[in-house]
Image (cartoon, rainbow, N blue to C red):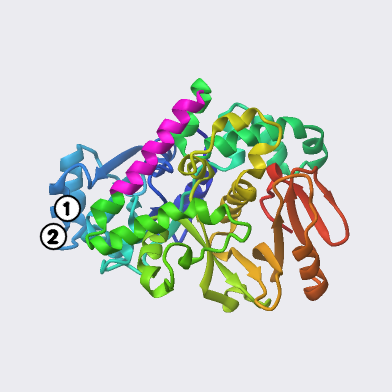
Amino acid sequence: MKREILEKLANWKNSKNRKPLILNGARQVGKTYILKEFGAKYFDNVCYIDFSSNESYKNIFEKDFNIERIITEFNAITSTKIMRGKTLIILDEIQEAPRAITSLKYFCENENEYVVACAGSLLGVAIHKNTSFPVGKVNLMTMFPLTFIEFLEAMGKEGLAKLLQDGNYESINDLSEDYNALLKQYIIVGGMPEVVKEFVENKDFTEVRNIQKEILKMYDNDFSKHIINQNELLKTRQVFTTIPRELAKENKKFVLRDMEKGARLSKYEVAIQWLVDAGVVYKIHNVDKIGIPLSAYKKMENFKIYLVDVGLLGAMSNLDYAVIIEENRLFVEFKGALAEQYICQELMYRYQDELFFYSDSKSEMEVDFMIQSRNEPIPIEVKSGSVVQAKSLKQYIKKYKPSYAVRFSLLKNKYDETIKNYSLWSVPNQIL
């Protein structure tokens, strides 16, 4: 499957300031696959080391960080002739070998002509667990599930994908029924590569759901394997399984007392951070004041939690995928949770740590998402149907007078003086 991150990897390879790369992301988003494809397309050969497959590979880094010795041993165990600038060295599941993470500093400082790319399903967790992380000596990149555009390409709808990429909204509006039908499929299937592959090949929603359930089991196995403290394990599972219920509320703010009467953030913050570090959830913080930068007004105690993938949310919620054949029921299930989850992951792909939501404690005003674009806060509202009355958004516009606001719904794309109305399937590459 074509992935947009391949172009980013090519730019990294050709960068004059290239450092060893750490490719982060949740389990099953396709990190290993894309690095191998990248190596096959842009290098003479690939040296692949998987630290989860052989315990002895970790011993390579126990003696010292002499890069020439390490390269010699890589040559020996993989029978690969490693050439500076011509071989891609892939260190997979590197979180299993903390000293291998530390070695990236020495690759950067002493032998930067070697091209090293690392991946791991729980790298974020490892980085926060007393690992000597080479700050400033690595390039970081995050991989996400397939976006809707990548899903269209996987489905053989390259023409429809290109219209979205080009922002050709006149033609997009003309083809709204096609996009609507495909978006319904995407919201059920999601963007996990194995799930998408199954759907592309067989169009079997039952097997799609089976694979999604298996991925969720893998996540739960990670909890059991890597969270040693049983009390923290129970809290992590409790937070994770509560997410669909919290998103089903009218107010999607994650409320700890919904899990336990009188619960405080201090009790659950380690569990929540573990899920964030593992890449399986997105934590979107509240801002209650508007200014630049938005991060300066972040309220640590107020947040929403979304899953990494909309298809997994449907699987966790046991959503009947038969709703795919119903006109617009899919988008209004769980009070619009699926539409909001979908927009969240599309925005996270583009803006990552710069995504927030706004609420005013002195009123009922709440705006679903906020981003910072062209040095200005931009409010974003998500509507799961074609009824787009947005009281909070109008109040926000009246109070803060932004250059414009953004609204996503099932309506076609159109703009007025203050609101850019995008259809749900038309998330632009830059909200300008």
Please name the residue shown 50% across and 21% down the image. 202
Image quadrant in which the C terminus is located:
bottom right
Give the residue number, with chain letter if any, for mark 2.
Answer: 62
Residue 392 percent across, percent down from the top left? 75, 65
Q: Secondary structure at mark 2?
A: loop
In screen coordinates, is 171 left or right of 272? right
Q: Are marks 1 and 2 in contact (CB under 8 Å)?
A: yes
Closer to us: 269 or 9: 269
Direction front: furthest residue: 261
Q: Is the residue 407 above or below the residue 317 in the image?
A: below
Q: Within 10 angstroms of label 1, few (less than 14), some, or many (20 or more) residues? A: some
Q: Which residues are magenta?
A: 204-221
Amino acid carrying mark 1 in the image? Lys
Viewer-closest of 368 and 242: 242
The reply to whether residue 36 is visible in this rendering is no
Q: Is residue 114 magenta?
A: no
As drawn, the label of residue 58 is 1
Residue 164 is left or right of residue 150, and the answer is right
